[in-house]
Amino acid sequence: MYIDDNYTNHSYHRLLYIRAREGIIVSGSIIPPCVGANVTIWYRMSGESWNILAVVITDEYGEYSYDWKYATAGTYDFKAKWDGDASHEATESSTNSITVQESPLPLNVIAVVAGIVTAIVMIVIIVSYYVLKFRKLKTS
């Protein structure tokens, strides 16, 4: 899509994808800015049918965003559509893709597991020490 010189007939979408730890923020804007516009965000797993992800409303700068908590790892395609208004024709963004990978264990889970393992090792050492001490006292 393009923006013509007088900004009255055409508009254009720009999508940005930010990978979040537990989701993806899909955001973009309508250029020129259009306040309060309903933008439909579409998604699909690569090669499958398109589904509506969300309908969002643009802010005072013509920007919108949606925080999507994805269900499974894979490659997703996204696009956004706007039906236009009295001064602008309808428009659709280009299709953009992102690959979501399974997250490694979060640091807090690793810290808890490390703490539990350390506690078990400490208990084994203490019990072994007292068992050996008790055996020495018994044999003396």
Image (cartoon, rainbow, N blue to C red):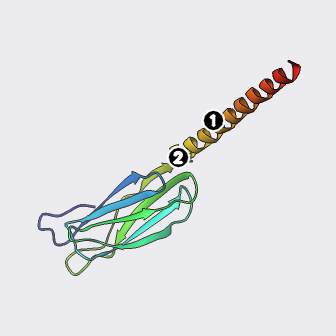
The quadrant in which the N terminus is found is bottom left
Label 1: element kind: helix
Q: Residues within 10 Å of mark 2 (few under 14, many from 20)?
A: few
Q: Amino acid at mark 1?
A: Thr
Q: Amino acid at mark 2?
A: Asn
Mark 1 vs 2, N-terminal side: 2
Residue in the picture at 26% in, 77% down: 36
Q: Residue 51 location in percent, x, y?
A: 51, 69
Q: Circle 1 sits on which residue?
A: 118
Residue in the picture at 39% in, 65% down: 66
Query: Up-down: is 92 above or below 113?
Result: below
* Distance between mark 1 and mark 2 Cα atoms: 15 Å
Report which quarter residue 61 is drawn in: bottom left
Report which quarter residue 95 is drawn in: bottom left
Label 2: element kind: helix
Residue farthest to the bottom, as pictured: 86
Can you tell which mark lies on residue 108?
2
Mark 1 or 2, closer to the camera: 1
Residue in the picture at 82% in, 20% down: 136
Horizontal side of residue 49 vs 81, given as left or right: right
The quadrant in which the C terminus is found is top right
